[in-house]
Image (spheres, rainbow, N blue to C red):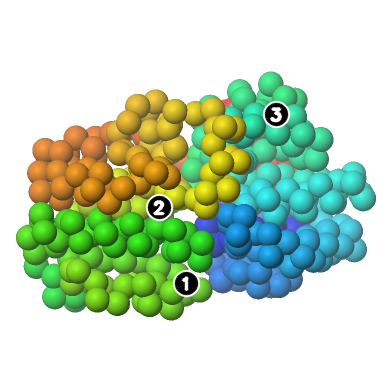
Amino acid sequence: MKHLNIMLVCGEPSGDLLGAQLMAGLKALAGDRIGFCGVGGAAMAREGLKSLYPLDATAVMGLREVVPAIPRILRHVRIAVNFALETRPDVVVVIDSPDFTHRVARGIRKRDPSIRTVDYVAPQVWASRPYRARAMARYFDLVLALLPFEPAFFEKYGLKTVFVGHPAVERRVRMSGGEVLRAELGIGADAPVLALLPGSRSNEIRFMLPPFRETVEILARRVPGLVTLLPTVPHVAARVRAGTQGWPTPLHIIESEAEKYRAFDAATAALAASGTVTTELALARTPLVAAYRLGWLTYRLMNPLITVRHMTLVDILLDRMAVPEFYQGGARPEAMADALVPLLTDARARAAQIADLDEATHLLGKDDESPSLRAAQALLEFVLHDRVPVGHS
């Protein structure tokens, strides 16, 4: 096999983790016959990527955050596009964050259509504005899909797609050590523990931490001995610490990724902002409640475009409400507390949801070959032979 130069572009921490896992899969299959360039964060750097600029330059969401950042985002789009044109990699793989990464793919396709582009983690256009799939077919050559129903959807629009499974399933082996963490933090083995995940973006902390705090205040009165674990990420940790002064229960803020997974294992239940973390909690078999709030203008613009009944991936896969969901005005502390109390106090309620979580994560490829290896294999087959492996669909 010839030496390949693969350009990877992600826009936020969740994409950085997926990119790192893809890089590890590619190295496992191709060894030193492959080189990487592009845009990533700390996880991708550990796999050998030297990023063109820091990842936090593009990790924004919501109109109030995005609008002021548009000049910076467009500048970084130009940097990535120009780099691709100058170096002409064998393929450009953009990962998640479509508001940023798809601009890169469009810019490359417009100026040099011979450079092949691949989308890893397609936007959920089947949930909102499905017409975007037709536009994607004009600037992507292949989609590496995380969800089993996506190939049939995208191929209706002429976009070659392969289901590779959800890479989050590979993190399942790291979701252990909860008993040790409890002992280290002085938390009793039988104490009810709530994992609180308000998000990894500044905007999410601003919208989600206050109602989550009110929810914990209610739970503290209804669940004796409750302890809160709050995993966060370094770039919003200061904001989290400022917003948790005088917390109503014993609180442990956790910044390391490894400790986050131990916290999932230690938790009796979780309250999480909807996103990748809800899938990770499902894989950790941690019963959860999901919630999300957007700025009012963002919500007014987006809500009429949503075409799915559920927002949490577990519920979408199962086509029923296995994980309680609370969105926008419905994300009221009293309602969230009511949904959490059984998960914190009733073993039968926890067991029932865990069975649903297991069913959903099986559909994500939990019991199959490593998704990152499947994605790496599909990518190599496409780059080298313009095909996807037999058995992928």
Residue that appears at 66% across and 69% down: 57
Side of 123 relative to 308 (left or right) = right
- State yes or no: discs 3 and 2 in contact (Cβ < 8 Å): no
Q: Which residue is labeled 1 in the image? A: 236
x, y percent for residue 3: 78, 58
Answer with the quarter of the image where residue 122 lies: top right
Q: How far separated are the C-alphas under marks 3 and 2?
A: 27 Å
Helix, strand or loop at mark 3: loop
Residue 67 in the figure: left or right of residue 167 = right
From the viewer's side, name the closer residue of 288 and 28.
288
**Amino acid carrying mark 3 in the image:** Tyr
Residue hosting label 2:
273
Q: Which of marks 1 and 3 is nearer the N terminus?
A: 3
Residue corresponding to mark 3: 131
Asked if residue 76 is positioned above or below residue 358 in the image, the reply reads: below
CB under 8 Å between discs 1 and 3: no
CA separation, marks 2 and 1? 15 Å
Q: Position of residue 288 (x, y in %)?
A: 28, 47
Classify residue 375 by image quadrant: top right
- Count of labels in the image: 3
Q: Where is residue 51 in the image (x, y as percent from the top left)?
A: 69, 70
Within 10 Å of disc 3 (Cα), the crowding (few <14, some 14-19, many 20+) is: few
Depth order, front residue of 337/192:
337
Q: Give the percent coordinates (x, y) of residue 213.
A: 29, 62
Q: Tell me the residue at 39%/44% (across/down).
A: 329
User: In the displayed structure, does residue 120 sit left or right of residue 262?
Assistant: right
* Residue 320 visible at all: yes
